[in-house]
Image: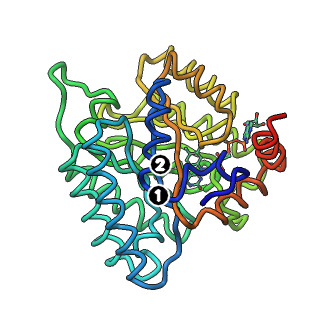
Amino acid sequence: MIPPIASRFVAGETPAEALDHVRTLNERNVRAIVNLLGEHYDDRVPAEADAAEYRALVEDIAGSNLEACISVKPSQIGLDLGEDVFREILDEIVETAAENGVFVWIDMEDHTTTDATLDAYEDLAHEHYGGEGSDGTRSSSEQWSDGGVGVCIQANLKRTREDVERLADVPGKIRFVKGAYDEPAELAYKDKAEVNREYKELLAYAFENFDEAAGIGIGSHDPEMIDYAISLHEEHGREFEIQMLMGVREDAQHELAEEYEMWQYVPYGGRWKSYFYRRVMERKENLWFALRAITGR
Ligand code: FAD
């Protein structure tokens, strides 16, 4: 069982606990991106086991009519064993998800995985695109209800501008994040101000140039980035969605959900310790928030 100190950031150990959390989110108009915790498997057995759990999860999501999708990590489903293993397992998950009308996000890991991850996204997005709506466009909710795929892209990587240009007409969704991995200085912006500038420029490019079928996700807790996305939405009239992690700025999530499409990234599973540790290390206040949650003060 997950101790109360970690349950602010992790929805539980089982799919049933994760879906219970999703249900409470949906009641507040917040949709869920469900992630089974796991990464860097150097053996096919755990990769296949997690893939089987994801396939069962998308069936449960579809069967319970929850507004939820899934997000998978490439190294969780075989990338450390080879690109062919990753593609084979990812294809199976996306196929089952498409049959069930559930959207699949592909998380982005460190720079050594970027090419393989983007290539997989591009191929699968074209393969699983459900076509246009009756008015010639599709909102991101419509994409969600038909299945589909999205990928995360990191503003801290210097290559990302070119990647975003390449992906501008791919019929899927891009989740823009600042980047969580400590990358070498020759490949990545290290200064926070530079990453923020890049993030904003990438958003401006996306709102101005993305094809209607290419959705935009704002994966950030940063009020400045969210306000900027809202101003771009008002200027260009393009739809977008906001995504934040479970346990982070939840009041803001509820408030934003009243006006915008809001998604919460909901991790669950037995491998919760390293995820919880990362949340605490990236922001020491998180430990304080978690302690307050259990002491009720
Ligand atoms: P930061 O730059 O960390 O902080 C900016 C401001 O945001 C702060 O000053 C504060 O005002 C506010 N803020 C930030 N955190 C908190 C907090 N805990 N509590 C209160 N206020 C806060 N990274 C990847 O590399 N690959 C992925 O696949 C990936 N997926 C993600 C999915 C989602 C839904 C999200 C939200 C993030 C994901 N990330 C991923 C992580 C991302 O790259 C950043 O490391 C992380 O989001 C921190 O950047 P930030 O934009 O949220 O804000």
Foreground residue among 48 and 173:
48
Residue at image coords 44%, 66%: 74
Q: Is 276 placed above or below 66 here?
A: below
Q: Residue furthest left?
A: 134
SS of the residue under disc 1: loop
Q: Is mark 2 within 8 Å of ligand 1?
A: no
Local packing at callout 1 (Cα closer than 10 Å; few below 14, some 14-19, many 20+) is few
Residue at image coords 48%, 84%: 42
Quarter of the image with the C terminus is top right
Residue at image coords 62%, 40%: 199
Local packing at callout 2 (Cα closer than 10 Å; few below 14, some 14-19, many 20+) is many
- Circle on res. 38: none
Is residue 296 shown left or right of residue 100? right
Q: Is there a contact, CB below 8 Å, between mark 1 and mark 2?
A: yes
Q: Which quadrant contains ligand 1?
A: top right
Write down the residue under mark 1.
14
Quarter of the image with the N terminus is bottom right
Please, what is the three-letter code of the amino acid marked with disc 1? Thr
Please, what is the three-letter code of the amino acid marked with disc 2? Ala
Is residue 7 shown left or right of residue 232? right
Displayed quadrant of residue 65: top left
Q: x and y percent of residue 73 in the render?
A: 47, 62
SS of the residue under disc 2: helix
Write down the residue under mark 2.
18
Is residue 170 shown left or right of residue 146? right
Q: x and y percent of residue 187 in the render?
A: 64, 63
